[in-house]
Amino acid sequence: MSIEVSGGKRGLTDPVIAAQILAAIPDKPLETQRKMNYFVTPRGRRLNEYEVLCCYTQPTPDWIAGGLDWGDWTQKFHGGRPSWSNESTEMRTTDWHKHRDPAFRWHYLYVKDKAEEWRYTDRFLKAYSADGHVRSIDPVWRDEVLGDYLGAFGFSEYGLFNSHSSVTRDCLGDTIRMSTAMIGLDKVDNAQMIQAERTFLAKIVPGFNESTDIPKAEWTKGQIYKGARETVEDIWQATYDWNEILFSGHMIYDPLFGQFVRREFFLRLSAYYGDNLTPFFINQMQLYHSQTKGITTDMFHTCLSADTEFGEYNDRLMRAWSDKWLPRTVNALKDFMGIFAKIPEIKGVTSKDAIQAALERVFEDWERDYAAPIGYKVDTAAHIKTILTGLK
């Protein structure tokens, strides 16, 4: 390296300064590491689009695990409550920003998927109407089960949607907020699909009542959904810990009650009553359930249960929450057994042994995917026996 020195004002051309600069240049590079060092820790080898757009978009104070901001916003709630607070949940972690949606979805991709699903639904319903498929549906199944009881189940899905309102406000991480907002919107989408099916039936079946009055009365006053209604009300309105809301709704109630109602009742039985319309909508709901399962198990198992410092504490807390919410869900399933007295009996399909087998499938899935990872021991046979006492 050469530095040209000339007369005039002192500056970079001054021989003394030039000598100092030359002396300050090291013989070897100070740093040989040329790899990008992200302040966001990627889940994979490199940051993807989802992480670039979703991580650290919320200004989380540095006293929240994983937060990078100093202090808190100047805006506070009445009484001085800060914008985000560790006291909003009993869960603990070394990093609230660790969670990732396994599908790496963000707003654009979510809207794109919904638009594609609606276009496909529109084409399916046009073909279904044109071919006259509705003529094959058993009238009792069509008018009472789909009209009243499927409609009432829509309120269960809508209630779970509403339970996310405080979660999306109080949660302590950007990716958690994105994920919980999406699974909440999936629940209201389920409720809307149920009503869309009922409205569609009203257009092609003379006399079919699309009003939500009867389903609402069944949900709020009937016996078949009594346990479910009380459980959803407690999740939505009587639970303040945002992690407990997510855990009770998506790790206990929906994988058990929701899966039995959607998969083992409406989806399994529809074909036996000549109904090939309802499975179209239920299968979309099952897709949403699968995506929700990926999100919640990543959050509670991959992140919180496996946390290096608080993992065992979080597992004990989740086991305690399971003790609290599992009996309520079992009671909800027991009440739901009353629906089998409302439908035409099909030997080997709606008999007690077939219902027991359906319950065993649901509990087997739940025990493997939700209970075992947190070390929760459960006597599924005893719970199924209790549920079956609800058969009339």
Image (spheres, helix red, strand yellow):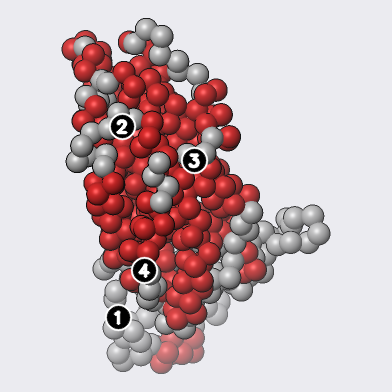
- View extreme (right): residue: 79
Q: Of helix, strand and loop, which one carries label 4?
A: loop
C-alpha separation, residue under disc 2 versus residue under disc 3: 21 Å
| Residue underneath mark 1 | 33
Badge 3 marks a residue whose secondary structure is loop
Frontmost of labels 1 and 2 is 2
Residue on which the image places disc 2: 281
360 above or below 215? Answer: below
Viewer-proximal residue, 101 or 32?
101
- Quadrant occupied by the N terminus: bottom left
Q: Residue at x 31, y 40 (%)?
A: 265
Q: Is residue 135 left or right of residue 342?
A: left
Disc 4 residue type (three-letter): Asp
Task: Determine which residue is flagged by label 3.
Answer: 225
Return the disc, 1 or 3, that comes first in the chain's sequence: 1
Q: CA distance from mark 1 to mark 3?
A: 62 Å
Q: Is residue 100 left or right of residue 220?
A: left
For the residues bearing labels 4 and 3, Cβ distance under 8 angstroms: no
Badge nearest the viewer, 1 or 3:
3
Label 1 vs label 4, nearer the camera: 4
Residue 391: which numbered mark, if any? none
Residue annotated with mark 4: 379
Q: Earlier in the sequence, mark 1 or mark 2?
A: 1
Q: Residues within 10 Å of mark 4 (few under 14, many from 20)?
A: few
Q: Secondary structure at mark 1?
A: loop
In this view, the mark in front (2 or 4): 4
